[in-house]
Image (spheres, rainbow, N blue to C red):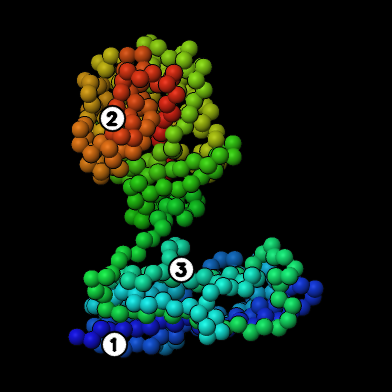
Amino acid sequence: MRKKKKSLIFIITILIMCFGIGYAYLTTTLSINGVTDVDANNWNVYFDNVQITDGSVTGDQVTTAPSIDSIGTTVSYHIRLKEPGEYYEFTVDVVNAGTIDAMIESINSKMNNNPLVELPAYLNYNITYADGAELLEFQELNAGVTESIKVRIEYNNDLAPEDLPSSAQSLSFSFSIGYVQKDSNAIEVDHVPLFQIHSMETILLNIRSGNIQDYHLGDTKTIKLSDGSNNTLRIINTSTPAECSQTGFSQTGCGFVVEMFQIAYPQVPFCTALGASNNRWDVSPYRSYLNNDVINLLPDIIRNNILDTYVVSSDSDHNESVVTTDKLFLLDFVEIVGETLTDSGVINNSRQFDYFESLGIRIGVNQALIRRTGATRTPYNNNMYIVFDSGTYDGETKFCTSGYSAYVAFRLG
C-alpha cells in the first residue's frame, strides 16, 4: 500500500533595507505551503489555530498577520523588524484529524534555495515545537493528536557594527516538513515539560484551578535563590486522596508538593544543639533553620504562595505523634519508602508521596530509584534517618557532623 504523504513547507523571504548608521529594516514574508496526497476519509493533516506571541512587533510593522489558507496547508505573513532586539513569533497547530497515524519523513531548511548552513549574524530564525523541543525525522503525529509548532524570526541584539547589514539584501528561507504514514521507525516527541517552561505565575494559577494534568511527577524547574545560587524544584505529589481528610492525618503528602534539591545547613549550631532530647521534628534546629532562614531564599512569587502544612512526625522513641504547622518540612521516612523500620507514630498518619509510589519504591524494592541523598524528619537516637541516592538508609550516621544536606518540601496553592 502506498504511503500517505503530506509536505508542510515554511517559506520565508526577507528583505533588509539599510538606514541610519548601522541599523536596517528587516522585512520578512513567511509562508507555509503544503502539498498533500491524501485519502480524504482517512488521511487529514492540516494547520489550524495561529496564535501571535506577546511581545512580537505590531502595528505598521505587520503588513500581513499570519493566516491559514482555505485548505489548511499554507500560513503566510509579512512583517518588518526595524532594529536589533525586535522579533516576531507565532504558533500554529499541526492537526492529525484523520484515522491514520503519521510521522515526519523529512525536514529540509534552505536559504536562497540552497541548504541552510549558517544564518546571517544579524538574524535568528527558528522553528521548533511550541515548548522548544526540536523537530526531528520519524517523530510521530498519531491520529487525533495536535502538535503546536513555533515560528520565530528575530533581529539579533548586541551586534558588532560589521555584523549589521550595510546594503539592501533579499533573503529567502524555506523550511519543509514531510509527513508520511507511521511505520516501525516512528519515535515519540521528546517534549520539554511545561512545568519547566511555564512561569511561576502560570503554574500557581493552574494549581488553584486544578488544571495540573500537564504537570507530571518528577518534572523539574530551575529557580534562582536570593543569594544568587540556582536550585531545582521537583514535583513529588499532586493528589489529595480521601485519607487526607481524616482527623489527625499529616497534610504533607496532600495536594501539590514540590521539593528543593539538597539544602545544606550551618554545622556548628546544629552539632551543639542536636541531641536525644531535641532531634524530634518539633524542636529540631533544622526545622527552625528551614522556616526562618531558607524560606527567605525563595523568590517572592514562591514564598508568598507556600501553604501552611499540618505536619505529623514521630517522637524520639517512636511511641507517639508530634504535630507542627510548617511552611517548609523534611519528608518522613515512610513518606519516601512507604513503610518504616520502626514502630513509628507517623506510619498510620501519613502516606507515601505520589512520586515515590509511582516508582514502586518499598523497603528492599526499587530503592535505587530514589536517587536522592538527604535527611528525613524521622528521628533515630541522637540522629535523623538518612536516605541515600543508592536507596540505602542509615540511622547511625550523624546528620550534623557527617555533612549531609536535605531535600526540603513545601506545598503550593
Label 2 to label 1: alpha-carbon separation: 57 Å
Please name the residue shown 37% across and 52% down the image: 215
Q: Residue at x 76, y 72 (%)?
A: 22
Q: Amino acid at mark 3?
A: Thr
Earlier in the chain: of badge 1 and badge 3, it is 1
Badge 1 element = loop
Residue occupying the point 36% across, 17% down? 383
Residue, disc 3: 128
Tags 1 and 3 touching, CB below 8 Å: no
Q: Nearer the viewer, mark 2 or mark 3?
A: 2
**Location of residue 97 (image quadrant):** bottom left
- Foreground of the two, 101 or 116: 116
Q: Which residue is mark 1?
A: 38
Place residue 2 in its image quadrant. bottom left
Question: Could you tell me residue 316's position as x and y percent?
Answer: 32, 15
Q: Quadrant of the N terminus?
A: bottom left
Residue 90 visible from this viewpoint:
no
Q: Earlier in the sequence, mark 2 or mark 1?
A: 1
Q: Is residue 101 left or right of residue 221?
A: left
Of marks 2 and 3, which one's residue comes earlier in the chain?
3
**Mark 2 or 1, closer to the camera:** 2
Tell whether label 3 touches label 2 (CB within 8 Å).
Answer: no
Residue receiving disc 2: 392
Whether residue 275 is visible to the viewer of this picture, yes or no, is: yes
Q: Can you give x and y, in whole percent of width and height, for residue 288 in the image?
A: 48, 23
- Distance from disc 2 to disc 3, alpha carbons, whole Å, reads 42 Å
Q: In the rendered view, does 395 fall on the left or right side of 16?
A: left
